[in-house]
Amino acid sequence: MEAFATFLLNFVYVSAILALVALGLAMVFGLLGVMNMAHGEFVMLGAYSAYVVQTAQISFFWAIPLAIFVSAIFGFLIEWSVIRHLYNRAFDTLLATWGLAILIRKGVEVVFTRDYKSVNQVVPGTVELFGVNYPAYRLILISIIICIFVVLLLWYQRSKVGLRVRAMVQNPGLAAAIGIDIAILSRVTFVIGVSTAGLAGALLAPLVRVEPYIGLDYLLSSFFILVVGGLGSIEGLLIGSTIIGGTDAVISTIFDKTAGYMSVLIISILFLWLRPDGIFYRR
Amino acid sequence: MTEKVLEVDNVSGGYGDLKVVKEISLDVYEGSANGVTGRNGVGKTTFLKLICGALPLLGGHVRLYGRIINRLPSHSLFQLGISYAPQESIVFDGLTVQENLTLHYSSSNLDRYTYVFKKFPRLKDRLQQKAGTLSGGEKKLLSFSRAVSEPTNLVILDEPTEGVQSDNIILMAQVINEEKVKGRSFLIVDQNITFLEAFSDRVHLFDHGEQTYHTDGPNFRNDIEKRILI
């Protein structure tokens, strides 16, 4: 029973983290059609924001606004300088953002070196839940992630800007004809998308080794999630995260990490082969 | 002399290097309506897309109250006072009828639609329905209602009567005539000559991307029909 509760909590925890990491990519790729290969680098920038906050010896709480600020600024500059010229050219965005990803990694390497940095655990200790002692920070993380999803979902479904984004995605020509500035709206969507990646990086920083290359893993798992779940819906993102996270958790527990990663790869390949649009697909 | 609202001056354009519209000129005056007609595939829709900034011009100018507008991004034309209801992909299928009518305003209330809802009560009944579930004719009514209720001086409509029931076509013509009295101008592409007759001050006939004939005054039916048959 206890083992099962631990497994269940781990499963929810891994899925929640994956969903948060993939959220920004799902927005940028699903809504704007931009293959953002620099997505993981925004997670990395978020993690370094947490490290900077720790170095400055101020409360970890400040890592969150700093990570959002840093990734929003980088996102704005990248959108303005490169991406806005490449909408509707998915393959070109892939090449361009891959180049930008290398640039960001090397830039961070220059400033912080390639050494591993560690961010201290902010909420140490465990909480008893369903008869097991579970790390408190993980539980806090799960609650924060649920809040982020609820807020973004409400924004997307209820707000005027969310409504206009949905209209733009469906029919950009008509949106422009009724006076909606598609260029600005795309920029806002891109910046919000990469900011969620930065936020994810800050929240994950205490749990991982912070180094310039951590983005690659997050980029890959985010793409796997979108391949399995399908583009353009929140259901797809959540289902994809649970399938990828769940498989990894189960196989890793039974065998080892390598087997877990291999099973994720096999699932992704099967989906690309047999069901390339994923489980949920808009249109 | 009434004021010139829209001045289309030798406009050419099309898709890539393919010139679909060749050197067309026409003027739209305040409080008046211009009809454009012709067979399928003669460049009518392309012509409207060129004016509304949905396609780049290959030559000529478009002026709104004397100001050149053909280099402006299409969303800014709405702010300058042009409404446009395209021929295809005319509504946001995934949004409700109410969302379709209000997404470009800061408030979601429907006060500005009181008048068109009286004419087309069917729309009011379907406010919460997804626009994608409407019939083709109902979508056209939704698109028409959205465009004529906007706070603009010039309304450009592309085939507004396509698939619409004949009773509603008569009501659409009534709405246009009432809006004209308020000083608004219209540029309307349609193949229904009776519809154009009901409100047009001028009619232009297109063929092979060129303007082959145009007329002032209401008695154009014979002229146009003769020329379409040729």
Image (spheres, rainbow, N blue to C red):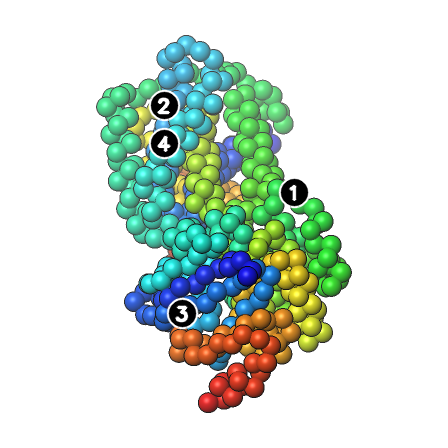
Mark 2 to mark 1 CA distance (whole Å): 41 Å
Q: Residue at point 41% right, 51% down?
A: B72
**CB within 8 Å, label 2 to label 3:** no
Mark identifier at residue B107: 1
Measured as percent of width and height from the top left, residue B57 is found at: 36, 61
Mark 2 to mark 3 CA distance (whole Å): 60 Å
Q: Residues within 10 Å of mark 1 (few under 14, many from 20)?
A: few
**CB within 8 Å, label 3 to label 4:** no
- Residues flagged by tags 1 and 4 on a common chain: no
The residue where tag 4 is placed is: A74
Measured as percent of width and height from the top left, residue A2 is found at: 58, 29
Between discs 2 and 4, the one toward the N terminus: 2
Q: Subunit of mark 4?
A: A
SS of the residue under disc 3: strand
Q: Residue at point 35% right, 62% down?
A: B60
Left or right: residue A240 versus residue A41 is right
Measured as percent of width and height from the top left, residue B204 is found at: 49, 74
Q: Residues within 10 Å of mark 4 (few under 14, many from 20)?
A: some
